[in-house]
Image (spheres, grey):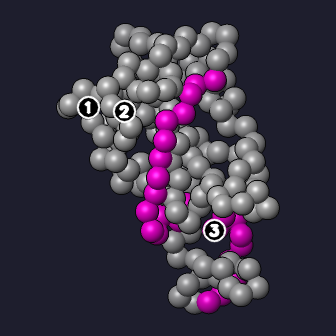
Amino acid sequence: MSEAVTSALRAAQRPVTSYLWTPSDSITFTPAVLSQIFGDGRSLFSITTINDRPAYWIIRGCSTWMISGDYRAPADAPDFADFTDDILTAIEEEYGTSDYYELNAQHRWIDSETKKFVPASWAEFPVINTHDGCSWGRLDWPSLDGIELEAHPFANRGNVLKATSPPERQVI
């Protein structure tokens, strides 16, 4: 991966303060970047699970993928939704899963089967909890020297890395 792209990903991986329902429930977290690249890797997406929101992971995905709302997308454009299982599995493999843990009444993490305490680092973001579904969206690449961007070819908003030949790496 080029140094400029690495720098752009570091810039996107800055602390974020966000909330789900009310500002009083705000949390500060740093989005986690998935190292696996999908397709041409020119687009940035966010993905979060119902149990981890508002925290999210940053995904380098294919510039040909559409998400709902991309009304100018070609009829045969692959849908991000079709890749979520692969993406969630890649996050699980890189960061681990907390699907086996739960918070007890004292807000301490316990193993769901043994009911023994586990370290918080085993269960908290960026470890993923895949129960109950996920949601996703498009992200912009940060503007930095040495990184060439262009408008997304069909998305209503967003940018992509300028096309190079050949792409850096194909995974899916």
Select label 3 or label 1 by which is in front. 1
**Of the residues under marks 3 and 1, which one precedes in the sequence?**
1
- Point out which mark residue 70 bears: 2
Q: Quadrant of residue 27?
A: bottom right
How far, Cα to Cα, is label 2 from label 1? 10 Å
Residue 127: x %, y % from top left: 59, 60
How far, Cα to Cα, is label 2 from label 3? 35 Å
Please, what secondary structure does the residue beneath circle 3 have? loop
Task: Determine which residue is flagged by label 3.
Answer: 123
Q: Is residue 16 left or right of residue 162?
A: right
Residue 143: x %, y % from top left: 64, 17
Q: Quadrant of residue 76?
A: top left
- Residue 118 within the segment the image draws in magenta: yes
Between 25 and 111, the one nearer to me in the picture: 25
Answer yes or no: do the residues labelled 2 and 1 have beta carbons within 8 Å?
yes
Q: Is residue 130 left or right of residue 73?
A: right
Residue 3 shows in this picture? no
**Of the residues under marks 2 and 1, which one precedes in the sequence?**
2
- Residue 15 within the segment the image draws in magenta: no
Question: In this picture, which residue range is highlighted in magenta?
Answer: 115-142
Residue 23 shows in this picture? yes
Q: Residue furthest right?
A: 24
Q: How would you rate the neighbour count of disc 2 (Cα within 10 Å): few for under 14, some for 14-19, many for 20 or more? A: some
Q: Is residue 165 left or right of residue 147?
A: left
